[in-house]
Image (cartoon, helix red, strand yellow):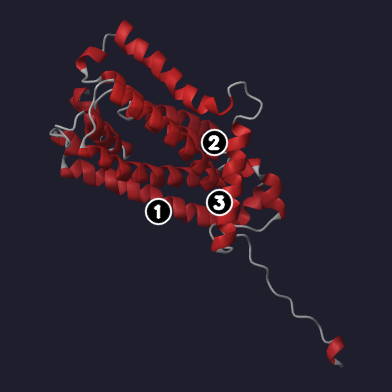
Amino acid sequence: MSVSEQPLELREVPRPSAMGGGTRRALDLLYLIAVNDFRKAYFGTALGYLWSLARPLLQFAVLLAVFTRVFHFAANVHNYPVFLLFNIVLFGFFQEATGLSVSSIVGHEAVVRKTQFPRLVIPLGVVLTTLFNLTLNLLVSFIFILARGISPEWTWFGVIPILVALFVFTTAVSMIVSALYPRFRDVGIIWAVLSMVLFYATPVLYPVAIVHAGLRDLIALNPLTPLFDLAQRWVTAPSTPWPSDPAVGGPVRLAVALAIYVGVCAFAVWIFRHEAPRIAEEL
């Protein structure tokens, strides 16, 4: 048998992975997806990109009116308007990024079916898009804070690691919901309910210190609770940068919240690696 007549050796083609495919290519795709998603989000709207600023400000105005004019709750909280706006901006980033990530892979079905690339760039692109919105909203928030007469403090620099931790946790949750949605379409509805529960179970509208002791123990286990509690303290109450209440700042509560935080991140990596090779088959 001549060389030309020898049977060809068949090689297995690897499935698309979660994070493989080359760093340079992944970064290029990540940039394209993030920019394209940001442009599509406000395409054809009257206000365009201004909606990224208008939405949290409108929500802030409504909630501030409710808690100051209806329930008279704000009088018991130091600098409540600043407290409320800052927390709405932070949680809005988490809620928007994870909510858009749920169907992000399905929304790029045509690309996922035809192209082999690291699937992680899709939910990560969504998170980066909302991170850009967060940057703009934080700029407006700090202008509002200065206008309220709050002077800059060294504790403001502590917000940077808080934002990094929030970005990592948001990315982890986005990876989980985006990886599960192609196979389990109920994830979209379930996460819409869970994100609403998290909004009220996170100290966005209220300081943890004023919550009833029984509920406070439960809220303290939320991995977002220490992030929001420290962020609002370092910005609005630098004289008390650490919580004095052991139910909030105790080592046991913080250790449990940190363990949940790490567990969610580890599960996100595992589930995305597990689901990424078969995502195209589920679409």
Would you place residue 120 above or below residue 199 in this image? below
Q: Nearer the viewer, mark 1 or mark 3?
A: 3
Mark nearer the N terminus (1 vs 2) = 2
Q: Tell me the residue that label 2 is attached to.
A: 100
- Reading the image, the residue beneath label 1 is 266
Q: Quadrant of residue 116?
A: bottom right
Distance from disc 1 to disc 3, alpha carbons, whole Å, reads: 18 Å
Q: Nearer the viewer, mark 1 or mark 2?
A: 2
Residue flagged by tag 1: what amino acid is it?
Ala
In this orientation, does residue 185 appear?
Answer: no
Q: Taking 68 as reference, is 261 above or below it?
A: below
Asked if the residue at tag 3 contacts the one at tag 1, i.e. Cβ–Cβ closer than 8 Å, the answer is no
For disc 3, the marked residue is 121
Q: Position of residue 119 (x, y in %)?
A: 58, 53
Q: Looking at the image, which is closer to me, 211 or 22?
A: 22
CA neighbours of label 2 inside 10 A, class few (<14), some (14 to 19), many (20+): some
- At label 2, the amino acid type is Leu
What separation in Å lies between label 3 and label 2 (alpha carbons)? Answer: 14 Å
Give the residue furthest to the bottom.
Answer: 1
- Secondary structure state at the residue bearing disc 3: helix
